[in-house]
Amino acid sequence: MTSHELTRDPMPARLAVGVISAGRVGTALGEALGAAGHPVVACSAVSDASVGRATTRLPEAAILPPPEVAERSELLVLAVPDTELPGLVRGLAACGAVRPGTIVAHTSGTYGISVLAPLADSGALALALHPAMTFLGTAEDTVRLRSACFGVTAADATGSAVAQALVLEIGAEPVAVPENARSLYHAALAHGANHLVTLVVDAVAALEAALDDVPGPERRATAQRMVAPLLSAALDNVLRRGQSALTGPVARDDSATVARHLDALGAVDPEIANGYRALARRTAQQSGASMPMFDVLDGRQGR
């Protein structure tokens, strides 16, 4: 497909897809594109895990070095870690593996399309297609893509139309993200998803320490069962109601209870207490807590 053809008809035809590499994201996106009718003809895979994913979930794809994947592709998906993306792009441009008119889409959240400039300068159509989703490396990832949003960045209306069509074809929702806002966009997602994992791990660890009467082998599973419905309800409530969904001692401006929490958590693990303190302070700012609350959180209690 040439750039002229894309200008006349931005809806992509059935495209030969190449994926570099068959990690968690690349495999899921390749599988989703294949289900939408775009054959995955080649992929790169180095580790045993990625080779296993490729052979199981992209069975029609030849496993090849990246330049050979690029040579066979009309739609080339670059699904490597952020740190590897600029070097990969420079290498593909230097060896001339990407043909003019090829659609090249990377899946990085923090980069826009400027990172693809060496390939765009040679006639490729550059797209940034970042799925706002976390991945486990299983077939469940592909199912989750259908309910995900993609942060989409393109250079012009033609690129935007192609990007939107590809995302819609796999059942997901495209959301335009300006080039200069990619880092902020990615930071927001990482803050929500990554730090939620940290928060839940700490909460489960503290709850395990409180469940002395539960036999050791069952303690973690019990703690997880206890917090699961609470966390699910809290997430649902805040997405529907925003700040008004807040409950608990900070929302009640109950500094005495927060002080007891900090003492109890500090006895289990001072770092968990520090994490609680930091998040509670931000919560206190958002909820307009009184000065005694900040005295407790900033260690001025009793002064």
Image (spheres, helix red, strand yellow):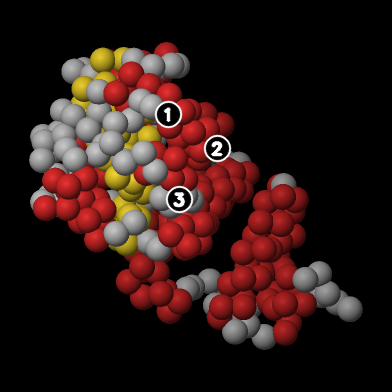
Q: Nearer the viewer, residue 150 or 209?
A: 150
* Residue 301 falls left or right of residue 253: right
* Residue 149 falls left or right of residue 178: left
Find residue 159 and report its horizontal and vertical position in percent.
Answer: 26, 53
Give the mark nearest the N terminus, 1 or 3. Answer: 1
Of discs 2 and 1, which sits in the foreground? 1
Q: Quadrant of residue 73?
A: top left
Q: What's under tag 2, amino acid-wise?
A: Thr
Quarter that holds the C terminus:
bottom right
* Residue 6 falls left or right of residue 284: left
Please tell me which residue is depicted at 81% across the width and 69% down the height of the picture: 299
**Residue position marked by numbered label 2 in the rendering:** 83
Q: Quadrant of residue 237?
A: bottom left
Q: What's under tag 3, amino acid-wise?
A: Ser
Please tell me which residue is depicted at 37% across the width and 61% down the height of the picture: 177
**Residue position marked by numbered label 1 in the rendering:** 92
- Is disc 2 placed on a helix, strand or loop? helix
Q: CA distance from mark 3 to mark 2?
A: 15 Å
**Residue position marked by numbered label 3 in the rendering:** 114
Q: CA distance from mark 2 to mark 1?
A: 16 Å
Asked if the residues shown at circle 3 and circle 2 are in contact, with their CB atoms under 8 angstroms apart, the answer is: no
Q: CA distance from mark 1 to mark 3?
A: 15 Å
Residue 176 in the image: above or below residue 25? below
Residue 65 in the image: above or below residue 8? above
